[in-house]
Image (tube, rainbow, N blue to C red):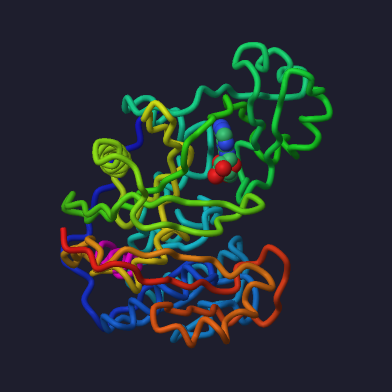
Amino acid sequence: MPVPNSGDDTGAPILPGATIGILGGGQLGRMTALAAANLGYRCHIFCQNIDEPAAQIASQTTLARFDDADALDSFAARIDVATLEFENVPIATLERIAARVPVHPAPSVQAVAQNRLREKTFANELGIATTPFRAVGDAAALAAVMTEIGTPAVLKTVRFGYDGKGQVGINAASDPVAAWADSGAGPDTDGGILEGFVDFDCEISVIVARAASGQTAAFVPVENRHRNHILDETIVPASIPDATAETARNVAIKLCDGLGVVGLLAVEMFVTAAGDVLVNEIAPRPHNSGHWSIDAGRTSQYEQLVRAICGLPLGDPTRRCDAVMKNLIGDDVETWRDEIEDPRARLHLYGKAETRPGRKMGHITRLGAPFTG
Ligand code: AMP
């Protein structure tokens, strides 16, 4: 299903001094707003809860629901360009804003990324490999699809899954009715998707920035290690053969070009023992696996986003040094007093008042050997 190229029609760059609207108030928005401030832009955050991390440091905030038409119109009237930091902003919300100001990446891109069936189909249509998958409409269909895809497999909701939520492992003995119920898939999630289980060697991601001109800049592939389905550490660079790294970068750039992204596209991939690179998921926004670029990159992913959506030239995506980014999840944040004393560790805290299990409270980037390549 082709997506119309959303390449830019705004013409002139949006210059420093202008206001960037960000939908979503989390840490990704906070770090985008900090990068925007460095380049002389103001940010206006549209978020649904008080005291969110991005709202704490923004010049303006709108506190309203994503379906509040009046709030959206008044937000759009006070910004020059909009982007988002939260994956599941409703498409109708984005389209309402796009009727007044440019929204990057475009609503058409978000519509693909919000739907696991569409994103995998889109990749396959570009000749990019994914794990085998099939749509599953209900529990009765699951039994047949299990036979078709084979086991082990993973059942996921088509929409609204993240950090392992809405996912159930399937083996030959699994009861389809129970598995369907456990996944939470149903009409609200546009059903389910059954994917073949990939016995991967490692999980990697590549983040690509793309300008309206079509210029792209890809960050180095990084390795992502998860704990309890949540990203725990990102290792920069991934230790994969050069040829695999090149394939991964090309896959990410091809997807970014194919979707016509203006802004950032993060592409999560599995690397198998045979060296195959399979796309798992895409996210057209800043990504947790790109936090390292603030301290170890020549240009951070957040600055690239600001440059891309404002029509400025992209920065140099190469790294200054190797790095390991560690998320501070839940009580991990208590280690900050030790980390702040380590001269090779860069500490970032997100200003969240309440620590909860599984909540991303901050991160540390440990700086490694200088990169001279
Ligand atoms: P996702 O929400 O699709 O990013 O999945 C969360 C995590 O579950 C991934 O980072 C993988 O560790 C694991 N996972 C997801 N899909 C598969 C699959 N098809 N095969 C093996 N592991 C998977």
Q: Is residue 81 left or right of residue 189?
A: left
Q: Is residue 271 above or below residue 26?
A: above
* Magenta stretch: dominant secondary structure: helix
Q: Image point 74% across, 16% down: which residue? A: 143
Residue 249 painted magenta: no
Q: Position of residue 65 (x, y in %)?
A: 62, 66
Name the spot of residue 27 as percent of width and height, x first.
51, 71
Q: Quadrant of ligand 1?
A: top right
**Residue at 35% of width from left, 30% of height from top?**
2
Occupied quadrant, residue 76? bottom left
Question: What residue is shown at x 46% (from left), y 31% (from top)?
Answer: 120
Left or right, 67 with respect to 22, comes to right
Q: Which residues are magenta?
A: 300-310
Q: Position of residue 192 (x, y in %)?
A: 65, 31
Q: Residue at x 63, y 50 (%)?
A: 229
In the depicted structure, whether residue 254 falls above or below residue 25: above
